[in-house]
């Protein structure tokens, strides 16, 4: 018994399921086929795999015999299922229409209903004079025309289906030899499954006729679509049948590989076909590395391949050749490096004890699926595409980071750095471009920034070659005129005050020039007297300039906020645009501007606004304040969101309310469940991070030319308020 079952399995293994034809159906069921297909007769029509449209009628030759008073037409149709087929004529309504010799009714659009089988449709036209044109259905490719008893070998017909009668009948038809030329180009795509795009170009001359070409596809390939300007179809044996007329025509046949295997065999030509096909191979490196073997290589620029195909490797393939896809390696190529850009905004604490940073990271991740901060950076909050995310650490006490589920990154992060700022990027990633703005509180000055390609403005960067020259010349003059002590004091004083606002500079040079002139004219009493008067006048002017300058310097040293009397420590324009108003968000944390406290209510309002701005996608935003979400009921939360939506500018009230309600309903939909699966934990309580400063006082712009590695260091030489007072 066991051997019998084994034999049955071995015999049944090669069998595969396939639809039965009417003749293959068992005899008792054969008479039920028509009853089962009632209402589904079009299912028996030919079709292409992967496409729903079916071709249930195939036209034959349209015979037209026309004269001055009227004409007659006759056409044979092969019908697979009951269908309406178009009649010729257009404005010239067909008369006396018959199907297989039986009168038939003409429906809307000059169509007639045909039963399955091979049917002959005939009819007549009546007019007072031969029209200039006659409309012929586009489905009809073959045409036999007789005008005034003379056969027209090449009926003039345009792309709109109009047949021109008068212009063509006045001249004798030229005699042209029938000729057919076929060119075949193929594009093999290493997809799953393997796809083959065949471009067949036929050049036709001579009379209209039906051509049956060779098999169009290699063994094991099934057609999916056929795009043709001429009536064309694939017969059961795979040969291409075309109703051709004079001209050059391009047919596109798309097919796919049935089953597994890397061998491709091109069938031998059975009819008119191209003996030298040009193939191109499109590899998919994200699936595997493969090469096409078995055919000699071609220079694609020396062929008639389409322009967009010439960038691919080309091969010469002849009918009967066998090709093979040789797999070199499975899987993706070594991933491309991460291409990220970073924009940083850094605020120094008022006491200089640390820094608050807001980073905007954009780009594409090629190697990693995680954004991780540097060890010195304490990551507090990260938002990806406007939604706050859950922070994770790979080890206990290790740096925090964000798991990124998409290659495209649009992240905004808030973080803290206690003590000195050493890392230029603040992340354990290499960046292609980095720019930063360092905000200094009142009383702090930037002496120099080491590790940056450009830092402006700093005390070192404000010096020019002319400034160095003038200060050194003035210091040398002080040394020569007044001795070493005054020379050193003069050099130090000029160096410290040269770039200070309101400091006298050119008066010092005038005093030195008059002092040198006074020593040179000691032998001339009159000149000595005049130079003395000039020196005293310049000293008086210098005193009048130095007195307010000294007062201003002392005031700024004691009260640094008086450095810019018409500027306040308040949010800049960019910060104002991002910060919500008090009406929308309620009372914010009072210490947010100083770097402390959370902004739970602000985060929640931002999440609702982000949901409203992207309401077209109707993706559910994650609430940034889980505490508030736990305390409020579902109905109260919806009403609160709608109340916030009422205050959003630029949208109608009804549209915003419907957007909020639709987003709530989408929480139970399949789409929302898929979105939630992309997150680590949709119900996680994400941190809101430290309160970020919004003030702007003195800013230093930092930039780096070219890529910036993650271990690049930066050193900030900052002068605190006490040192500024002493200087």
Image: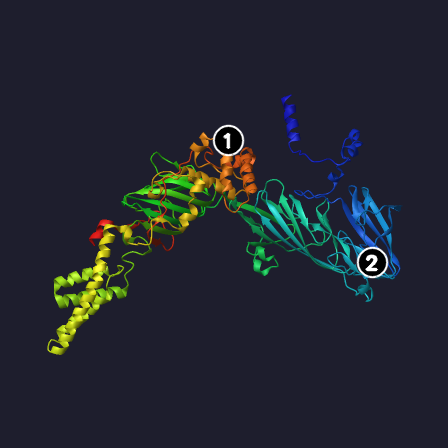
Q: Which mark is residue 634?
A: 1
In this view, the residue in front, 535 or 427, is 535
Instruction: State which quadrant residue 126 falls in.
Output: bottom right
Residue appearing at x 64%, y 56% in the figure = 276
- Rate crowding at label 2 as few (under 14), some (14 to 19) or many (20 or more) other CA atoms within 10 Å: many
Where does residue 614 sit, x and y in percent of width and height?
A: 52, 43
Which percent across, then down, holds residue 725? Answer: 22, 52
Q: Name the quadrant of the C terminus.
A: bottom left
In the image shown, does 82 or 417 lie closer to the viewer?
417
- Can you give x and y, in whole percent of width and height, for residue 584 in the image? 45, 41
Q: CA distance from mark 1 to mark 2?
A: 77 Å
Q: Residue 131 falls in which quadrant of the image?
A: bottom right
| Left or right of 602, for residue 295 | right
Viewer-proximal residue among 540 and 695? 540
- Helix, strand or loop for disc 2: strand
Would you say the residues marked 1 and 2 are in contact, meaning their CB atoms lie under 8 Å apart?
Answer: no
Q: Is residue 188 visible?
A: yes
**Displayed quadrant of residue 599:** top left
Q: Nearer the viewer, mark 1 or mark 2?
A: 1
Query: Residue at label 2?
Result: 145
Circle 1: element type: helix
Q: Is residue 403 visible?
A: no
Residue ID at (29%, 56%): 458
């Amino acid at each position: 018994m066991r051997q019998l079952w084994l034999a049955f399995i071995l015999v049944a293994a090669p069998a595969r399921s396939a639809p039965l034809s009417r003749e293959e159906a068992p005899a008792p069921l054969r008479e039920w086929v028509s009853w089962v297909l009632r209402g589904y007769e079009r299912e028996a029509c030919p079709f292409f795999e992967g496409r729903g449209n079916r071709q249930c009628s195939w036209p034959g030759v349209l015979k037209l015999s026309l004269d001055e008073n009227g004409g007659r037409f006759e056409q044979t149709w092969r019908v697979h299922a009951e269908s309406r087929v178009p009649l010729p004529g257009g404005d010239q309504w067909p008369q006396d229409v018959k199907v297989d010799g039986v009168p038939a009714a003409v429906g809307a659009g000059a169509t007639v209903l045909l039963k399955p089988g091979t049917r002959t449709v005939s009819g007549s036209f009546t007019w007072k004079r031969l029209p200039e044109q006659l409309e012929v259905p586009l489905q009809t490719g073959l045409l036999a025309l007789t005008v005034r008893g003379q056969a027209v070998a090449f009926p003039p017909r345009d792309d709109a289906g109009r047949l021109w009668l008068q212009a063509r009948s006045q001249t004798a038809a030229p005699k042209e030899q029938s000729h057919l030329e076929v060119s075949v180009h193929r594009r093999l795509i290493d997809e799953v499954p393997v796809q083959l795009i065949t471009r067949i170009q036929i050049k036709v001359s001579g009379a209209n006729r039906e051509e049956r070409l060779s098999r169009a596809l290699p063994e094991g390939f099934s057609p999916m679509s056929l795009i043709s300007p001429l009536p064309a179809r694939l017969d059961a044996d795979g040969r291409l049948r075309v109703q051709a007329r004079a001209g050059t025509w391009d047919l596109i046949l798309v097919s796919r590989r049935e089953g597994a295997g890397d061998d491709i065999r091109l069938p031998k030509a059975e009819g008119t076909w191209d003996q030298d096909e040009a193939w191109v191979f499109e590899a998919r490196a994200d699936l595997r590395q493969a090469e096409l073997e078995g055919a000699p290589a071609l220079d694609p620029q020396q062929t008639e391949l389409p322009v967009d195909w010439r960038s691919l490797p080309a091969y010469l393939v002849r009918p009967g050749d066998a090709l093979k896809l040789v797999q070199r390696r499975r899987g993706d190529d070594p991933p491309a490096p991460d291409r990220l850009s970073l924009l940083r905004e850094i605020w120094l604490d008022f006491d200089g004890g640390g820094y608050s940073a807001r980073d905007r990271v954009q780009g594409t991740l090629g190697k990693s699926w995680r954004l991780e901060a540097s060890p010195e950076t304490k990551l507090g909050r990260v938002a990806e595409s406007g939604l706050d995310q859950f922070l994770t650490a790979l080890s206990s006490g290790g740096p925090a980071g964000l798991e990124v589920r998409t290659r495209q990154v649009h992240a905004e992060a808030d973080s803290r750095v206690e003590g000195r700022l050493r890392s230029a990027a603040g992340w354990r990633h290499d960046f292609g471009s980095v720019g930063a703005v360092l905000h200094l509180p009142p009383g702090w000055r930037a002496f120099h920034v080491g590790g940056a390609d450009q830092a402006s403005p700093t005390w070192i960067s404000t010096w020019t070659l002319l400034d160095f020259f003038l200060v050194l010349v003035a210091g040398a003059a002080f040394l020569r005129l007044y001795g070493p002590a005054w020379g050193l004091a003069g050099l130090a004083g000029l160096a410290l005050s040269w770039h200070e606002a309101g400091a006298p500079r050119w008066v010092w040079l005038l005093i030195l020039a008059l002092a040198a002139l006074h020593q040179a004219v000691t032998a001339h009493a009159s000149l000595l007297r005049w130079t003395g008067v000039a020196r005293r006048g310049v000293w008086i002017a210098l005193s009048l300039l130095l007195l307010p300058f000294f007062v201003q310097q002392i005031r700024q040293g004691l009260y640094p906020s008086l450095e810019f009397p018409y500027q306040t420590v308040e949010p800049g324009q960019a910060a104002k645009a991002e910060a919500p108003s008090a009406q929308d968000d309620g009372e914010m944390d009072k210490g947010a501007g100083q770097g402390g406290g959370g902004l739970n209510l602000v985060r929640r309002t931002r999440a609702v606004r982000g949901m409203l701005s992207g309401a077209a996608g109707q993706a559910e935003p994650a609430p940034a304040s889980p505490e508030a979400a736990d305390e409020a009921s579902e109905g109260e939360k919806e009403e609160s969101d709608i109340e916030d939506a009422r205050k959003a500018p630029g949208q109608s009230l009804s549209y915003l309310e419907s957007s909020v309600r639709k987003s709530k309903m989408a929480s139970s939909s399949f789409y929302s469940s898929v979105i939630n699966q992309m997150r680590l934990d949709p119900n996680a309580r994400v941190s809101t991070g430290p309160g970020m400063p919004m003030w702007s006082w003195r800013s230093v712009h930092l930039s780096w030319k070219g890529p910036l590695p993650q271990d690049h260091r930066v050193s900030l030489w900052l002068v605190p308020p006490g040192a500024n007072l002493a200087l």
